[in-house]
Every structure is written in C-alpha cells, then in structure tokens.
Image (cartoon, rainbow, N blue to C red):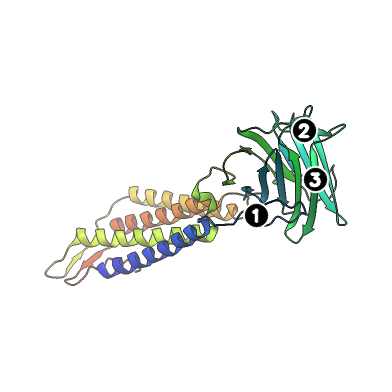
C-alpha cells in the first residue's frame, strides 16, 4: 500500500505541476513596445493600442488608445459581417452612442447611430463624431479602426475619466440592418481614460482562462493524490501483524445496499449530465466540477463496498485489500 500511495502521489503531483506551469505561462503578461502613434488602416498591430478588452466567450475584441483630445478604437469580430460598439446608454441600446461598421468588396462602411429604444437605433443626423476610419476582412474575421474626439456633440456621448457602460455585437452579414443573433453580443463597464491594462470579460478570475484540457489535467492530478491519500490512511489504520489473519464480513442488511444503489444512480446521472454539457454552451469550469464529483462519488462507492462486503486477508508484509490497484 505504501508503494501504491507513493506512485499515485508522484503521478498526481507531476500532472498538477505540468498543468499549473502551462496555466501560468499562458496567463503571464507579455511585454509589448508601445508604438508612437496609431495608423488608421484596418491593421491592428502589436503595441498600436494601449488598452485591450476581450470577450473570450464570444471572441469579440475592443482596442483603444487616447492621444491628446482624441480616442482611437479598434474592433475585431470573428465573423465577416458588421461589427459594432456602443458607448453609454441606460437600458440595452436606449441612449447608447453606437458605431457600426462592415467591409464589403474591399470598401469600409461605418455609421454612428443613437439608440432610440432598448431594441433599435437610428443614424445620427447631421455631423457625427467619426473623424477617420478603415477596415479589412481576412481569415481571422473583420477588423475596423476609427478615430473620434473624447468630447461629444449634441446627443453623442462625451468620454470622461470614469467607468462607462459599453455594449458590443457583431454579425455574419455585411450591412447595417441584419440582426446579430444570439451568442454574438455582450455588455461591460470600461474606463477609457484609466491606466493601460488588459480587461477580460466575465468574473475576472483565473478559472475563466483555464482551457478544457487543463481542467482535465487538474482533475486527474487531484484524483491520483486522493487515491494516494486513501492508500496511506488505509495502511496507517490497518497497521502490520505478525501472522496471516482472514476476516469475514458479517451480514449488514439492506441499509448499505440502498445507500450504494443511491450513490451509483446519482453518479450515473452526473455522467449523463456531463455528456449533455459537452454539446451545450457552458463553461469548462462547470464541466470540470461535475467530472471531479463523478470521480469523488465513485471513490466513496468503492470504499463503502470494500468496508461492508469485501472479505479481508491481512498478511505480514502488506495488506491485500482486494482493490484493483
């Protein structure tokens, strides 16, 4: 049993160390030299913008940089239709200063709208705040850059040094009117004049950056350590004896059978739920927790079954508790 504990513990520790190193390496800040200016050409270059927001779930990106009294925006959508960002507003699109753009046949089209209801928007009449713009479409999706003043005009939004409500969306159709559809929109709060940092969508915890294969590695590592812990505790409780002893289990009635049956049914339901979640849009963290629960309950079932039903043979060298390892 001590050898079993050692090898399971070693395997679990190695898996966790490799997975942890991979997570740290992926999420470590990358140093990028800031360029002296922004070039409005539809190409978002490393260091061109000082700030970056990313919605990893919807794969939408917003870049910005303030120079003097101007602010430069870069938008990226994974689709090849329109892409938009809205500033301010109260409810959904109502009152938001919306910039919507698309690229078609090599030409970039952009429009500034105002949200006239929670579910609709109309073009800004007269002069708008857009001073320069450019875009491109490639295999990575749609990129659009534009420039405007920090100060607004008329009903358009003035950008100040405080958190601002920001909405965003994109579609796969290159026009101003098509609906974006579900799963391609979002909302956040951004202070565009704050110090340079990368902002990510969601709860802002490390778990949202963990990939599915990394979660699997964490689960397996914890599982191996858990098994090694069981082996160590079992060896400690059983101890060593001077002569072989055969211990038969006494009849225990229907109680333990009912408990084991209930745990087995619950574990099967968790497995079914895990399979369903593989085909439903959800977080890797939730799937990881369910998978970990499946293994934990399975270990409890094995331990209870051994305790109530498996006869034990204790020998001088090492305990043979009839477990599969």
* Extreme residue toward the bottom, this view: 317
Which residue is at the front of the view, 308 or 48? Answer: 48
How far apart are labels 3 and 1 at the CA level? Answer: 19 Å
For the point 75% across and 43% down, the residue is 147
- Pointer 1 or 2: first along the chain: 1
How far apart are labels 3 and 2 at the CA level? Answer: 28 Å
Which residue position is annotated with label 3? 132
- Pointer 3 or 1: first along the chain: 1
Q: In the picture shown, does residue 155 fall above or below 180? A: above
* Left or right, 200 with reference to 149: left
For the N terminus, the image quarter is bottom left
Q: Which mark is residue 26?
A: none
> Quick one: label 2, few (<14), some, or many (20+) residues within 10 Å?
few
> Quick one: label 1, few (<14), some, or many (20+) residues within 10 Å?
few
Q: Give the mark toward the camera: 1 or 2.
A: 1
Secondary element at image label 1: loop
Q: Residue 119 carries which label?
A: 2
Whether the residues at callouts 3 and 2 have beta carbons within 8 Å, the answer is: no
> Quick one: label 3, few (<14), some, or many (20+) residues within 10 Å?
few
Which residue is at the front of the view, 184 or 239? Answer: 184
Q: In which quarter of the image is residue 278?
A: bottom right
How many marks are shown on the rendered structure?
A: 3
- Pointer 3 or 2: first along the chain: 2
Q: In the picture shown, does residue 111 fall above or below 21? A: above
Residue 117 picture location, percent across and down: 78, 28
For the point 88% across and 56% down, the residue is 105
- Is residue 81 at all visible to an observer of this figure? no
- Is residue 124 at all visible to an observer of this figure? yes
Which residue position is annotated with label 1? 35
Whether the residues at callouts 3 and 1 have beta carbons within 8 Å, the answer is: no
């Amino acid at each position: 049993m001590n050898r079993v504990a050692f090898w399971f513990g070693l395997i679990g520790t190695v898996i966790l160390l490799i997975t942890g190193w991979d997570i740290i390496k992926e999420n470590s800040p990358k140093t990028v030299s800031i360029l002296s200016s922004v070039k409005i050409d539809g190409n978002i270059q490393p260091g061109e913008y000082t700030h970056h927001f990313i919605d990893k779930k919807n794969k939408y990106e917003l870049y910005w940089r303030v120079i003097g009294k101007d602010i430069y925006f870069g938008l990226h959508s994974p689709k090849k239709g329109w892409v938009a960002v809205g500033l301010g507003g109260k409810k959904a699109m109502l009152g938001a200063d919306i910039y919507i753009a698309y690229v078609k046949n090599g030409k970039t089209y952009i429009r500034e709208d105002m949200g006239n209801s929670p579910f609709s928007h109309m073009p800004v009449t007269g002069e708008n705040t857009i001073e320069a713009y450019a875009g491109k479409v490639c295999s990575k999706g749609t990129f659009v850059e534009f420039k405007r003043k920090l100060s607004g005009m008329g009903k358009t939004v003035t950008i100040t040094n405080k958190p601002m409500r920001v909405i965003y969306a994109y579609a796969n159709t290159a026009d101003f009117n098509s609906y974006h559809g579900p799963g391609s929109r979002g909302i956040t709060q951004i202070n565009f004049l704050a110090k340079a940092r990368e902002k990510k969508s969601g709860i802002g915890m490390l778990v949202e950056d963990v990939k599915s294969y990394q979660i699997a590695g964490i689960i397996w590592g914890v599982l191996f350590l858990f098994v090694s812990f069981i082996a160590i505790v079992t060896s400690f409780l059983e101890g060593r004896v001077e002569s072989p002893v055969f211990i038969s289990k006494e009849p225990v009635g229907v109680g333990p059978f009912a408990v084991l049956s209930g745990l087995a049914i619950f574990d099967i339901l968790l497995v079914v739920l895990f399979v369903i979640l593989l085909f439903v849009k959800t977080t890797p963290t939730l799937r990881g927790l369910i998978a970990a629960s499946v293994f934990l309950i399975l270990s409890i079932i094995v331990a209870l079954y051994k305790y109530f039903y498996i006869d034990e043979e204790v020998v001088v060298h090492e305990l043979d508790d009839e477990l599969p390892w």
